[in-house]
Amino acid sequence: MSYFGHSVVRAMIIESNSLIVLTFQLLQKEVGEGTTVQSILANPNSWRGRSEQIAVLQNKLSNLKADETPPSRMEQKRQRDIKNLEKNRKKQLQVLEYFSEYY
């Protein structure tokens, strides 16, 4: 093998090593802090990936949204009453502010 052949092989090895390092860093970000890739490889059934966790949480969220019941008539009436009380309170404050400016 010529000198040119060795330099090509060396460049390929260096490129492969840098790709391995980048892949490991990416995998470590996917795994998250506090967990090592080695621990996952030792016990693969005890770990769920980020995308799987997201899917589980989205499923839980959609189930919670589906379980929400619309407010009852009594709750709707209470909400209207509270809004009316707030409006009346604001009007009273405006009147008080108006009179406090002139008296």
Image (spheres, helix red, strand yellow):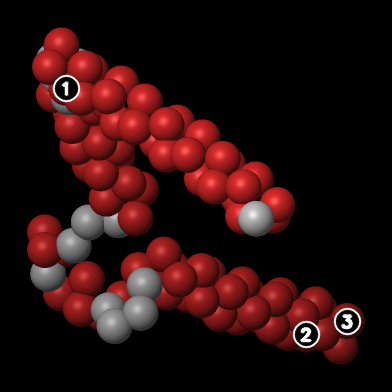
Relative height, residue 55 to residue 28 (above, below): above
Q: CA distance from mark 1 to mark 3?
A: 82 Å
Q: CA distance from mark 3 to mark 2?
A: 6 Å
User: From this viewpoint, which residue is outermost toward the top?
Assistant: 73
Q: Quadrant of residue 73?
A: top left
Regarding mark 2 in the picture, which secondary structure is present there? helix
Contact, CB < 8 Å: mark 3 with mark 2?
A: yes
Q: Is residue 20 visible?
A: no
Amino acid under label 2?
His
Mark 1 Cα-neighbour bin, 10 Å: few <14, some 14–19, many ≥20: few
State which mark lies toward you, 1 or 3.
Answer: 1
Q: Quadrant of residue 57?
A: top left
The residue positioned 58% from the left and 42% from the top of the image is: 94
Amino acid under label 1?
Glu
Q: Is residue 7 visible?
A: yes
Foreground residue, 86 or 41?
86
Which residue is denoted by mark 3 in the rendering? 4
The residue positioned 35% from the left and 68% from the top of the image is: 31
Which residue is denoted by mark 2 in the rendering? 6
Residue 26 x/y as whole percent? 51, 69
Which residue is denoted by mark 1 in the rendering? 75
Q: CA distance from mark 2 to mark 1?
A: 80 Å
Q: Is residue 12 left or right of residue 40?
A: right
Regarding mark 1 in the picture, which secondary structure is present there? helix
The residue positioned 27% from the left and 24% from the top of the image is: 81
Quadrant assignment for the C terminus: bottom right
Contact, CB < 8 Å: mark 2 with mark 1?
A: no
Residue 25 x/y as whole percent? 51, 76
Relative height, residue 76 to residue 98 (above, below): above
Which label number is shown at residue 46?
none
